[in-house]
Amino acid sequence: MTTSVSKQEAQAALSQIEDVTRRGMTLRGYRHAGPILMLWGVIWAVGYMGMAKLAPNYWGWLWLGLDMIGFTGTLMLTPKVIGGGGAPVQRWRMSLGMAAGVAFVLAIVAIFPKTELLPYLALPGLFVGFIYMALGAIMAPRYIWIGLGIFVATLVGFFFWPSHLAEWMAVVGGCGLIVSGLWLGSA
């Protein structure tokens, strides 16, 4: 006795296989991203706490050093191979993307008036929150929640505790990224 599979059954089976593969790749990506988020959580906490303690003319140097540590650590933590197909991670693309983000923020800082520092404390949180929400909408839904958390926490600190925004961002943003990294790493 022979059993034949209809065209619709074969397409349904292939669709299920593709869904499982896609889900597995997303979960693997979360696990790889977890340590990177934790690294940036520590950098974020140190950077914002430094902003709370240092004069503003030192902030750029502080963040330059921390960003270099973060970029180097991110590239070291990025797996050489992602996904089931074994496609190499294109580190140059990741580096270019990070550089573009930094250039965007620096351009805003360069052209906006320097009459008040508070918006400059909030800018990175809003920018990072937006980037994570966009990544989540495009490729990995958990990033939406991480981005939304950072975005909302930044606005809450900005409007409710402006005199302590740097400390707020150090604790809420830094710890938020660390907890998010643990959440992604457990996926």
Image (cartoon, helix red, strand yellow):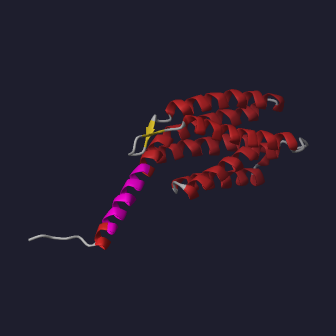
Rendering coords of residue 60 (x, y %): 77, 31
Q: Residue at x 29, y 67 (%)?
A: 10
Rendering coords of residue 26 (x, y %): 45, 51
Q: Residue at x 61, y 51 (%)?
A: 132
Viewer-proximal residue, 84 or 126? 84
Rendering coords of residue 18 (x, y %): 38, 58
Q: Which quadrant does the N terminus fall into?
A: bottom left
Q: Is residue 102 above or below residue 144?
A: above
Taking the view exactly as shown, the residue that stands out farthest to the left is 1
Q: Is residue 187 visible?
A: no
Q: Is residue 22 above or below residue 35?
A: below
Q: Residue at x 56, y 34 (%)?
A: 74
Q: Residue at x 26, y 73 (%)?
A: 6
Q: Which residues are magenta?
A: 11-25
Viewer-proximal residue, 175 or 126? 126
Q: In the shown orientation, is residue 115 left or right of residue 137?
A: right
Does 39 lie within the magenta span? no
Q: Quadrant of residue 75?
A: top right
Q: In the shown orientation, is residue 174 left or right of residue 22?
A: right
Q: Is residue 134 visible?
A: yes
Rendering coords of residue 171 (x, y %): 64, 42
Count the labels in the image. Answer: 0
Viewer-proximal residue, 85 or 39? 85
Q: Quadrant of residue 169?
A: top right
Magenta-colored segment: predominant secondary structure:
helix
